[in-house]
Image (cartoon, rainbow, N blue to C red):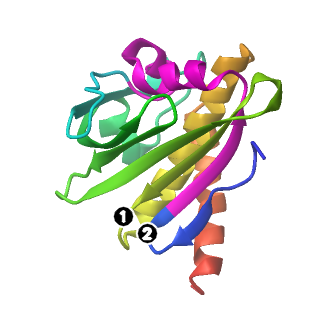
Amino acid sequence: MNTEYGQYTARGEVRFVRLLPGSVERVWAFLTESEKRSRWLASGAMDLRVGGGVELVFNHVNITPHTEPVPEKYRDAACGHPMTGRITRCEPPRVLAYTWGEADGSDSEVTFELTPESGGATRLVLTHRRLGDNRDMILSVSAGWHAHVAILIAKLADAPVPPFWSVHAKLEEDYARLFDAANNR
């Protein structure tokens, strides 16, 4: 389950299902607390109420111990890249959703749904929707979530953390094949 590719469940939508090591409360903290979230995704303030602001500051060079080159197309977003949004749903510690501010002014939305599982684990269903028709953005988002959640799983398990950029590049290629096959390209 934790290595399966995300599924394109609708036009402009990708969904991931993962089994995370740790309680729902612990995973919720890694989604909502800036210091913990900065270890796998991005730092930044989050006002945990519907309509509350979300600030994500991506610093990809700090989420893994690996030193590797940043792909040219992501150089501007590699270190200290900000993104803002608004909370659209907040049901602690089970559901968190917020808009994902895009450079072109259109906002997509990401939803995290947490369900307790046996053995103290948590089932995560992550859905990113309203991605539009921009193939490059859909591939980047798909590979990005896949790589970021793999890092989250490693951090929660206190296990070795995979590199980000090389994994992301490989996943972008994989998602391109999946996306093109799903869209008969």
The crowd level at tag 2 (other Cα within 10 Å; few <14, some 14-19, many 20+) is some
* Percent position of residue 134, x then y: 37, 69
Counting residues from the start of the chain, the first of labels 1 and 2 encountered is 2
Q: Which amino acid type is shown beneath numbered disc 2?
A: Gly
Q: Which amino acid type is shown beneath numbered disc 1?
A: Arg
Q: Is residue 10 visible?
A: yes
Say which mark, if any, is on residue 116: none
* Percent position of residue 75, x then y: 36, 38
Residue under label 2:
12
- Can you say whether 7 is above or below 181 in the image? above
Looking at the rendered image, the quarter that the C terminus falls into is bottom right
Residue sitting at x 45%, y 47%: 111
Residue sitting at x 25%, y 30%: 55
Q: In this view, does 143 lie to the left or right of 130?
A: right
Residue 96 magenta-drawn? no
Separation of disc 1 and disc 2 at Cα?
Answer: 5 Å
* Percent position of residue 25, x then y: 56, 20
Front in this rendered view, residue 77 or 85:
85
Can you tell which quarter of the image residue 57 is in? top left
Say which mark, if any, is on residue 130: 1
Q: In this view, does 43 lie to the left or right of 84?
A: right
Residue sitting at x 78%, y 47%: 1
Magenta part of the chain? 14-42
The secondary structure type at the circle numbered 2 is loop
- Can you say whether 91 is above or below 108 in the image? above
- Which residue, as the protein is rendered here, is positioned at the far right? 119
Front in this rendered view, residue 76 or 159:
159
Contact (CB < 8 A) between labels 1 and 2?
yes
Residue sitting at x 65%, y 34%: 150
The secondary structure type at the circle numbered 1 is loop
- Can you say whether 180 is above or below 18 in the image? below
